[in-house]
Image (tube, grey):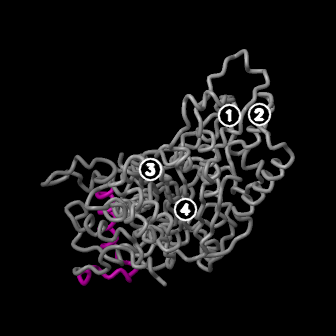
């Protein structure tokens, strides 16, 4: 119990006794210091790190005041990779490929905005080579002679893919990523056949892919509470449909079929192969789950493949494994708990990549936060210029993050939604983003809008709020790179922070991506 609690880094600051009392609502002094420190650090990390030298940065308060909200937002690269998942390769003018597949399987995805986010995360997994690149919409005909000549894609045959979704809820992100991976692995098991045009409309004898049966993609869903319309239901339905289709055809289903009929059968699968997914749900709070004990096969596979004394033949006989972790809008401290829960698997070399969309920074906790040491070093170093940084300061930063999700010129949160969220009720029922606009009224201290107006900051409260979000995420990136995925005192992973969709899709659009350095 509580095995993943505690965050990372010292919780107390030796100089906290000198921190200005933040309980006084009229006390702007510390808030003003923090606001300028946030802008200096953000500028140092994301805008112009080379401008800092051993003496002075030359970044005066006057220059910080001129920093606009767009300057802060555009400092983070936008990498929306959703378009390639929606595009039909055979019909370039036709889009909605993923949407059509979701509709065919009657998967409740939460609406167009959620589909775009899921598609972009899937695109990032492909960009990191964690799952195969997207293949053609139509599977081309292949002859057994050609397959034997070109040989089978050994990576496809020997690779077992495991996708772990943290804070999964219904598991729709994991379902799409796993079924897309299963479809891609199945279609990259063999090389494309360069068939002759004159054979295009003739009936060809096609063996059952030389008895190739690609391994199922393993989907592991970690969620503390039960839910309806789960991913498991869709997978079971898809398996039943696949079995029924197989019974309705002869055992030589792939023999003596026309090209048109073959393409029609493949078209039915769209871009998702739900029947090629094996799902496991771990019902446990992220604070308590022991991923090492729950998934021992990941550790054994990683251990057998990491030894250097195996011969090439032995290694070839062993099944390769790719394991990746995904999360979408894992609220507040949930992201930190999820990262802590992966430490034993990561230390064993059992994780190949991690893609997490963060959310609800206002619900973070100093006690559970994994980037404490990093933030303290920044705020108390030459860049931040503060004499101390502790829990009170962090609590003010996390409250300020709520300003980034307010609409337009709004300066006050929706108090009805605030009460619902505080009581554990989500009126959106999963169809809206977790815009944690409640946290600005939780706790005491100056609001970020008051601070921005007092200091005359061009970026306003929204700009400061977004900068606070990215600094909290930066602390997590630093923990992942320097602690979680660092083995044998060597840096093995590259960790990046980007916007995976535009802010018009969701204001909570930050994505942390980690992958092995090649």
Ranked by sequence position, the earlier of labels 1 and 4 is 1
Residue 410 belongs to the span the image colors magenta:
no
Label of residue 164 in the image: 4
**Of circles 1 and 3, which is in front?**
1
Please identify the residue farthest to the left as the structure is shown: 55
The image position of residue 87, as x and y in percent, is: 64, 36
**512 w.r.t. 95: above or below:** below
Who comes first in sequence, dot 1 or dot 2? Answer: 1
* Residue highlighted by disc 1: 139
The tag on residue 262 is 2
What is the spatial separation of the Cα atoms under label 3 and label 2, in whole angstroms? 41 Å
Part of the protein shown in magenta: 16-42
Q: Nearer the viewer, mark 2 or mark 4?
A: 2
Is 476 positioned to the left or the right of 137 in the image? Answer: left
Question: Helix, strand or loop at disc 3?
Answer: strand
Q: Are marks 3 and 2 in contact (CB under 8 Å)?
A: no
Badge 2: few (under 14), some or many (20 or more) residues near its Cα, within 10 Å? some
Q: Which mark is residue 125?
A: none
Q: Please give the name of the residue rendered at 61% of the width and 57% of the height, measured from the top-left corner.
A: 173
Give the image quarter of residue 283: bottom right
Q: Residue at 50% across / 53% down in the picture?
A: 319
**Disc number placed over residue 498 in the picture, else none:** 3
Query: Is 347 or 176 nearer to us in this picture?
Result: 347
Q: Residues within 10 Å of mark 3 (few under 14, many from 20)?
A: some
Q: Secondary structure at mark 1?
A: loop
Q: CA distance from mark 1 to mark 4?
A: 28 Å
């Amino acid at each position: 119990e509580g095995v993943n609690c505690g965050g990372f880094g010292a919780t107390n600051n030796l100089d906290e006794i000198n921190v200005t009392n933040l309980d006084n609502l009229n006390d702007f002094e510390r808030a003003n210091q923090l606001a300028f420190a946030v802008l200096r650090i953000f500028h140092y990390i994301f805008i112009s790190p080379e401008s800092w030298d051993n003496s002075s940065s030359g970044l005066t308060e006057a220059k910080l005041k001129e920093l606009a909200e767009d300057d802060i937002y555009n400092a983070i690269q936008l990498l929306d990779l959703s378009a390639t998942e929606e595009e039909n390769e055979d019909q370039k003018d036709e889009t909605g490929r993923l949407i059509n597949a979701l509709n065919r399987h009657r998967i409740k995805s939460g609406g167009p905005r959620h589909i775009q986010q899921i598609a972009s995360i899937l695109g990032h997994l492909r960009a990191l080579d964690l799952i195969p690149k997207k293949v053609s919409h139509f599977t081309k005909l292949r002859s057994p002679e050609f397959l034997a000549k070109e040989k089978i894609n050994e990576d496809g045959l020997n690779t077992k893919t495991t996708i772990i979704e943290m804070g999964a809820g219904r598991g729709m992100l994991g379902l799409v990523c796993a079924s897309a991976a299963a479809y891609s692995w199945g279609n990259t098991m063999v090389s494309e056949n360069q068939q002759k045009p004159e054979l295009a409309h003739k009936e060809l004898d096609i063996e059952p892919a030389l008895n190739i049966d690609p391994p199922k993609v393993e989907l592991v869903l970690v969620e503390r509470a039960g839910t309806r319309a789960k991913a498991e239901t869709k997978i079971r339905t898809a398996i039943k449909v696949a079995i029924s289709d197989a019974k309705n055809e002869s055992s030589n289903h792939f023999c003596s079929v026309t090209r048109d009929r073959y393409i029609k059968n493949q078209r039915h699968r769209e871009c998702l192969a739900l029947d090629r997914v094996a799902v496991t749900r771990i019902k446990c709070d992220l604070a308590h789950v022991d991923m090492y004990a729950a998934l021992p096969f990941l550790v054994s596979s990683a251990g057998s493949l990491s030894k250097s004394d195996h011969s090439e033949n032995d290694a070839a006989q062993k099944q390769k494994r790719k394991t990746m972790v995904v999360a979408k809008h894992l609220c507040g401290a949930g992201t930190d708990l999820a990262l802590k829960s992966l430490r034993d698997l990561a230390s064993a070399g059992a994780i190949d990549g991690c893609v997490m969309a963060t959310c609800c920074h206002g619900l973070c906790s100093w006690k559970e936060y994994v980037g404490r040491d990093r933030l303290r070093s920044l705020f108390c170093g030459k860049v931040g210029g503060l004499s101390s940084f502790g829990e009170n300061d962090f609590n003010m930063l996390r409250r300020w993050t709520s300003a980034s999700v307010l609409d337009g010129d709004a300066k006050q949160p929706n108090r009805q939604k605030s009460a619902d969220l505080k009581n554990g009720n989500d009126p959106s029922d999963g169809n809206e983003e977790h815009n944690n606009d409640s946290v600005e009224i939780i706790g005491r201290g100056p609001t970020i809008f008051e601070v921005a107006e007092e200091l005359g900051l061009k970026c306003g409260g929204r700009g400061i709020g977004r900068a606070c979000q990215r600094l909290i995420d930066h602390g997590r990136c630093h923990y992942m790179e320097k602690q979680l995925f660092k083995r044998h005192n060597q840096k093995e992973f590259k960790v990046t922070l980007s916007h995976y969709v535009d802010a018009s899709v969701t204001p909570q659009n930050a994505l942390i991506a980690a992958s092995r350095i090649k």
